[in-house]
Amino acid sequence: MTDAQSPGHASPRVVLGTPQDDLASWLREAQILMVQYPAAAQALFRAFVAEGRRFAKTTEGRRWRDELASSELIRRGRVVWEVGTLNLLEEDGETVLPSKLLDAVVQAAGVAELEPFLSKLFESLWGTSP
């Protein structure tokens, strides 16, 4: 009888990640890419905004806007967008992304209870405390 078969030893098993784990991983990767390539991220965001504005001028676009205006899914999607992009992208694109990131770091440095704040932030981003 092997150790795995003996009483008191659990059989090996495969544990698959949840779809949420995969999604969180993808969002983290997108954040990293955005910070690594800020000019490309800002240009892509401006292109999305421009395309959305063009679509909003069409009959179908106005219909979708009216239909989705009070959507809970859209509200939640906006929260995901703002957290996922670290709220660093701007429609006008005047502010350079690293400058906005630096502004966020400076604001965070002013938080009175910095260590608990950072621990909570780290846990929410990576799923564990530092």
Image (cartoon, grey):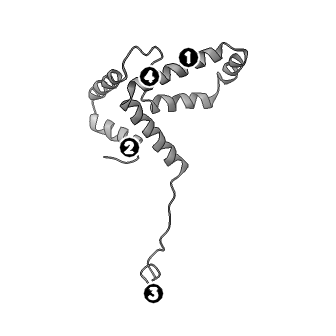
Q: Position of residue 127 (x, y in %)?
A: 41, 47
Return the residue at label 3: 1
Would you place residue 14 above or below residue 25 in this image?
Answer: below
Residue at mark 4 to residue at mark 1: CA–CA distance = 12 Å
Mark 3 or 2, nearer chain start: 3
Dot 4 crowding, Cα within 10 Å, few <14, some 14–19, many 20+? many
Q: Is residue 127 above or below residue 47?
A: below
Q: Residue at position x 40%, y 13% from top?
A: 94
Q: For the residue labelled by badge 4, is the local secondary structure a helix, a strand or a loop?
A: helix
Measured Cα–Cα span from mark 2 to mark 1: 35 Å
Residue at horizontal 52%, vertical 46%?
20
Q: Which residue is mark 4?
A: 42
Q: Label 3 sits on what residue type?
A: Met
Residue beneath disc 2: 123
The mark that comes first in sequence, 4 or 2, is 4
Q: On the image, which quarter does residue 109 sit in?
A: top left
Q: What amino acid type is highlighted by mark number 4?
A: Gln
Whether tag 3 and tag 4 are in contact, CB under 8 A, the answer is no
Q: Earlier in the sequence, mark 1 or mark 3?
A: 3
The disc at residue 50 is: 1
Mark 3: secondary structure: loop
- Alpha-carbon neighbours of circle 3 within 10 Å: few (<14), some, or many (≥20)? few
